[in-house]
Image (spheres, rainbow, N blue to C red):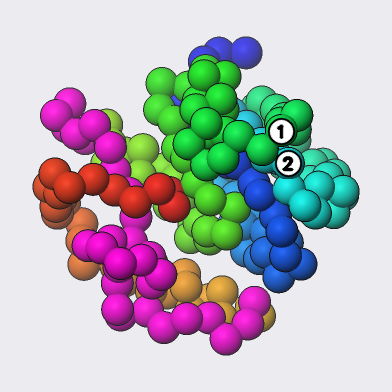
Amino acid sequence: MSEPLCTIVVSMYNSKPTTLEVVDSLFLPSLVQNAQKSHQLILIDDQSPLKEETRKLIAKWKPELEKRIGDITYIENPENLGFARSYNKGMRRADGDVVLIANDDVYFPQNSINALVSTLKFNENIGAVGPVTNYANNFQNTLLFHQLKDYSPKELERIEKFATWLRKTMDGKIYDKQKGLIGFC
């Protein structure tokens, strides 16, 4: 297999059933819709209290992920390493020339992974990129998108419409923020 363009590293510490619901309803479906054979996926369970449930959830989505992603690795840490050490472990295993780190509670609108990679590749002086969210305390917060009411198709369509509008609005605009990005994606 040729070198993946993008390695997606996700460390999971699922301690609540509601988190697993987000992973099942938002994160994994949106990852599948964005996945490409040129991607590598590294999923790490960082000794989740709900490790068995996480394992079952990954098994549920594995056939669909395998159809779409070139290389998938699932790692169970023998002990809880914490956020940074777990992601560092995943990044050391990455083969892609671009590494995308993401929390397991994000939603990737259509074509958003490619958009992030394209923005990063746009200018050799850019070292990191990140999307906006409605749940942050820094410049990446957008107050323009209200929290989801549920995970219904209508609400997911609302995300997609907002993402399409935002892409058009921001097309070609890059904001230089020397203060750094938050680690959600």
Q: Is residue 134 magenta?
A: yes
Q: Is residue 68 visible?
A: no
Residue that numbered label 1 is attached to: 79
The residue located at (52%, 42%) in the rendering is 83
Element on which disc 1 rests: loop
Q: Find residue 2 and report its horizontal and vertical position in percent.
A: 55, 13
Q: Is residue 99 visible?
A: yes
Q: Is residue 137 magenta?
A: yes
Q: Find residue 136 and report its horizontal and vertical position in percent.
A: 36, 66
Residue that numbered label 2 is attached to: 47
| Amino acid beneath label 2 | Gln
The furthest residue to the bottom: 149
- Of residues 171 and 21, the one nearer the viewer is 21
| Amino acid beneath label 1 | Glu
Majority secondary structure in the magenta region: loop
User: Are dots 2 and 1 in contact, CB under 8 Å?
Assistant: yes
